[in-house]
Image: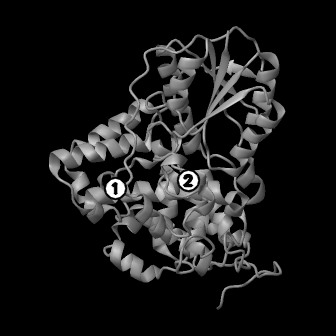
Amino acid sequence: MKLGVVWFGEDLRCADQSVLWKAAQEVDYLVCLYCDEPHHRSSSRYATQGMSKNRRRFLKQGLQSLALQLQSLGQTLFISTLDAATSLNILLNEVPIAHLYRNHHGGWDERQALKSIANRYPDVRIHLGHGLSLFTPSQLPFDIAELPDSFSKFRRLVEDIDTFAPLPALQKLPPVPVFDIQRIRPWKLDKVEDRSAFTGGEHAAIDQLSDYFSTDLPSYYKETRNKLDGWESSTKFSPWLAQGSLSARQIKTSIDAYERDHGANESTYWIYFELLWREYFHWYATRYGKQLFLPGGLTRRQNQGSYYAERFRKWSQGNTPYPLVNACMKQLNETGYMSNRGRQIAASCLIYELGIDWRYGAAYFEEQLLDYSVGSNWGNWQYIAGVGADPKGGRHFNLQKQTEQYDPNQQFIQKWQGQIFDTQLDSVDAADWPIYPAQ
């Protein structure tokens, strides 16, 4: 009898899931495992608190949805609160697992955990899927070690590659073997609170995909995507993509179907263009590993930013002298979401106006964003800071011009009360001496 384990991560779905299909064909018994471990890296190094309440709620909804999907296929979702390497060590020592199924993850920590398991258990066959990306490595016209140094070069090489069609729905999975491990328990099927526009999980993801492409919004996406607010201004797919309750291939298939029925234009292409940006950062994280988190990034140049605790706190709370930035940050804290344009504006302010090390901003976004993805988040912050894939060496936005262009009537600022802030940015100097306001 062959036993296998599917190690879930940012792929909380059963649809278009090659690792589940492969496991169903190869093993007699199967364990479906998710390691709900604390996020240590950012909270311990960058004065953040770990996963926000919004992210935690969205994750719980995604796990609940996955557990229900697995149940309908005759399976059970098991949860461990230990880190992945420890959890798998315990499981592999207690249960005679012969096969481990996992989707390739670009994150350094995630890949190190898998590497440690491979080294410790050489007899366990590891099957690596590519359910987090649009393409597999074999489809790319270059080796990952030769990843182009800019998105434009990458896009020109890959945009005409045909993507694989999503896999058909599974009908059944192998049963669960009998085991009893105290720290690895079945997910408890309870109702998870739902007070947000974003509900985690596969059902909500498919609903959003269907709802969006049933309108004419894709034909106008490029015209509206830079708006700071509004549900219909962009696709809103990113939280479910980051959670893996929706695959990039499912979206690409919907784009193709929409273009066949309604015609292709620059806007429909631009949805695919954004998927390619996400794809680039997926392989970017894979290619550069720990360099994603270094102050000098890929350039290794000396980082100009520092850490001012008071300024960072005011930025994160939306209490700076910049009303548009304040509104963006308050929106993020309240909803777990911020527009792409808002993210660029907020990042530019932290780095260039406030003089803070870009990594603190990236870590705060990791804490708050429902659509947090390691490659996209840290790669985009490097891009703005000029230590990553931007050939221009950074993006410093003029906040006044951004306000005039994207919030000319200050409706967004007023909605999120960005105009309310302390008039004095700093109350202490670099030596921690009080600064008194000018009389």
User: Relative to 71, does residue 139 appear above or below in the rendering?
Assistant: below
Which SS class for mark 1? helix
429 or 70: which is nearer to us?
Answer: 70
**Residue at image location 67% in from the left, 65% down from the top:** 359
Label 2, label 1: how far apart the Cα atoms are: 17 Å
Q: Is residue 281 visible?
A: yes
Kindly identify the amino acid type of the residue bearing the numbered disc 2: His
Kindly identify the amino acid type of the residue bearing the numbered disc 1: Ile
**Percent of width and height locating residue 50:** 68, 48
**Percent of width and height locating residue 6:** 62, 26
Give the number of the mark in front: 2 or 1.
2
**Residue at image location 43% in from the left, 82% down from the top:** 400
Q: Earlier in the sequence, mark 2 or mark 1?
A: 1
User: Relative to 424, does residue 421 appear above or below in the rendering?
Assistant: above
Location of mark 1 (residue): 271
Horizontal placement of 377 versus 180: left or right?
A: left
Identify the mark at residue 282; answer none if there is no mark.
Answer: 2
**Percent of width and height locating residue 257:** 24, 43
- Disc 2 residue crowd, few under 14, some 14–19, many 20+, Cα 10 Å: many
Residue 410 found in image quarter? bottom left
Horizontal placement of 205 versus 347: left or right?
A: left
**Percent of width and height locating residue 144:** 60, 56
**Residue at image location 50% in from the left, 31% down from the top:** 18
361 or 151: which is nearer to us?
Answer: 151
User: Relative to 67, does residue 298 appear above or below in the rendering?
Assistant: below
| Residue occupying the far left of the picture | 262
**Residue at image location 56% in from the left, 51% down from the top:** 373
User: Relative to 287, does residue 153 appear above or below in the rendering?
Assistant: below
